Amino acid sequence: MEKNRPLAIFAISALFMIFVVTCAWFKQNGFQDVQKLQTAIEKTKSEIDAKKAENNLFRIELSSLNHSDRYVEAIARENLGLVKPNEVVYEFVEPSSLDGGRIDVP
């Protein structure tokens, strides 16, 4: 029995380690849950960075709107189609948007 004692201690230790690792991996709040949460944190951080960049663009645009009459005029012309008195506006239309893209040649 004395000869099998180290082997028995090793086997018990190995089984205990397998049990501990299995519990740590699969139990609630185990490694799998931690990995999922870390992935969610990374995704949220990237979304925050994108929103910060978008907010920075909005701040720049707001500053331009507050300080530049030319910028306000350009936005009004582009979005609202406003024109100055005695100004002629030319609108170019792509041939493919007319009659479904057909061009009748006489």
Image: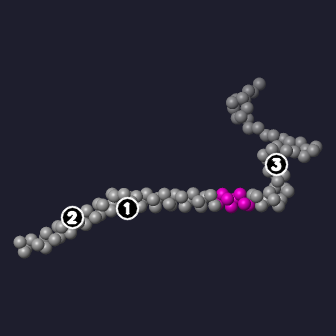
| Residue at image mark 3 | 76
User: Which of disc 2 and disc 1 is earlier in sequence?
Assistant: 2
**Which quadrant would residue 34 be assigned to in this image?**
bottom left
Towards the viewer: 66 or 73: 66
Position of residue 11 measured from the top left corner of the image (x, y, whole percent): 17, 67
| Residue at image mark 1 | 31
Mark 3: amino acid: Ala
- The stretch of residues the image draws in magenta is 53-60
- Position of the C terminus, as image quadrant, is top right
Mark 2: amino acid: Leu
- Label 3 element class: helix
Mark 1: amino acid: Phe
The residue at 86%/42% (across/down) is 89
Q: Residues within 10 Å of mark 2 (few under 14, many from 20)?
A: few
The residue at 68%/61% (across/down) is 56
User: Which of disc 3 and disc 2 is earlier in sequence?
Assistant: 2
Towards the viewer: 44 or 96: 44
